[in-house]
Image (cartoon, grey):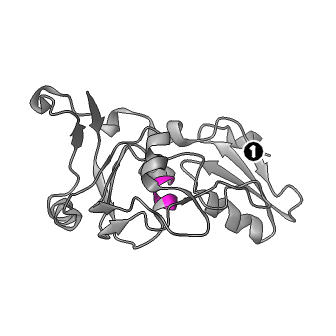
C-alpha cells in the first residue's frame, strides 16, 4: 500500500499544529514540523464561536496529505485535550511519520527547493510507485466552500470574501471588526455577490 504525496513544506513553530494541519493553504502537501517534540497539548474538542466558526481550527478538516515529526507525544497534557495528535490523524486517515531528523529534512527542502515525495508503507516497491504532482489538480476548487455563507449577518459593514482557501481566523477577524462577511466559492460570479 502507498500514499502518493506532493511537495513537502515545513513549519518551525513550537505550537499551532492543530491550526497548521487544518490550514487550507497546506492542501495535499506533506507538513514537516521542525520542533523536536510535537503533540504535547493534544487536540481540543471542536467548538464554534459566536460567528459559527471553529474556535481552535482553521477549517473543518485536516488538509495536509501527511505529517512528519521528530517525535510525537502519546500522552497529551492540557485541559482542553480530548485526544492525542496520533488519534486525530488516524480519525482523519492522515498518515504520520515520526523518528525523522526534521531539521535536516527542512534544511534539504530549503536548499533544494520544492521536492515531490511519497510515503511508502509496508516496505513496498517504492521505485515503481507514481508521484502525484499537485499542479495537475485544482486545489482551490477542492478547499473552497461550495455555497455562499454569511457570517455575522448583523454587521454594519458588508464584505464579500472569495474563498480560495480562507482560514476561519481571517473571517473571524473581519467579523470582530463589525463586518457582515459573505464568503463565496472561488468561482462565484462577483457581479451577483451582493
Residue neighbourhood size for the residue with mark 1, other residues' Cα within 10 Å, grouped as few (<14), some (14–19), many (≥20) = few
Vertical comparison of 137 with 81: above or below: above
Is residue 92 highlighted in magenta?
Answer: no
Q: Classify residue 45 as left or right of residue 71.
A: right
Magenta residues, start to end: 18-22
Which residue is more in the foreground, 33 or 117?
33
Residue at the image position 26 percent from the left and 62 percent from the top: 70
Image quadrant where residue 178 sits: bottom right
Residue 64: horizontal and vertical position, in percent?
41, 47
Residue under the image location 14 percent in, 58 percent down: 112
How many marks the image carries: the answer is 1
Picture coordinates of residue 53, whole percent (x, y): 70, 55
Residue shown at 53% from the left, 42% from the top: 143
Q: Toward the viewer: 61 or 173? A: 61
Q: Secondary structure at mark 1?
A: strand
Counting from the top left corner in percent of width and height, residue 119 is at 24, 40
Quarter occupied by residue 145: top right
Q: Which residue is mark 1?
A: 149
Please provide percent x and percent y for residue 104.
Answer: 16, 65
Write the residue at 80% across / 61% down.
50
Q: Main secondary structure of the magenta part?
A: helix
Position of the N terminus by quadrant: top left
Residue 151 location, quadrant: bottom right
Q: 119 left or right of 57? A: left
Q: Is residue 35 above or below residue 119?
A: below
Pick the residue in front: 174 or 35.
35
Q: Nearer the viewer, residue 169 or 18?
A: 18
Amino acid at each position: 500500500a502507498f500514499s502518493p504525496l506532493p511537495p513537502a513544506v515545513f513549519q518551525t513553530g513550537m505550537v499551532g499544529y492543530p491550526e497548521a494541519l487544518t490550514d487550507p493553504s497546506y492542501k495535499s502537501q506533506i507538513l514537516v514540523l521542525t520542533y523536536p517534540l510535537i503533540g504535547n497539548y493534544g487536540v481540543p474538542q471542536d467548538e464554534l464561536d459566536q460567528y459559527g466558526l471553529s474556535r481552535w481550527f482553521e477549517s473543518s478538516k485536516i488538509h495536509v496529505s501527511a505529517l512528519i515529526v521528530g517525535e510525537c507525544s502519546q500522552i497529551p497534557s492540557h485541559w482542553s485535550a480530548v485526544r492525542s495528535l496520533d488519534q486525530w490523524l488516524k480519525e482523519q486517515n492522515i498518515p504520520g511519520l515520526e523518528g525523522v531528523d526534521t531539521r535536516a529534512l527542512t534544511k534539504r527542502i530549503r536548499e533544494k527547493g520544492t521536492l515531490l515525495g511519497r510515503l511508502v508503507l509496508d516496505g513496498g516497491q517504492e521505485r515503481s510507485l507514481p508521484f502525484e504532482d499537485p499542479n495537475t489538480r485544482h486545489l482551490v476548487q477542492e478547499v473552497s466552500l461550495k455555497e455562499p455563507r454569511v457570517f455575522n449577518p448583523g454587521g454594519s459593514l458588508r464584505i464579500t470574501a472569495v474563498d480560495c482557501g480562507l482560514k476561519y481566523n481571517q473571517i473571524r477577524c473581519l467579523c470582530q471588526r463589525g463586518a457582515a462577511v459573505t464568503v463565496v466559492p472561488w468561482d462565484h460570479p462577483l457581479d451577483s455577490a451582493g
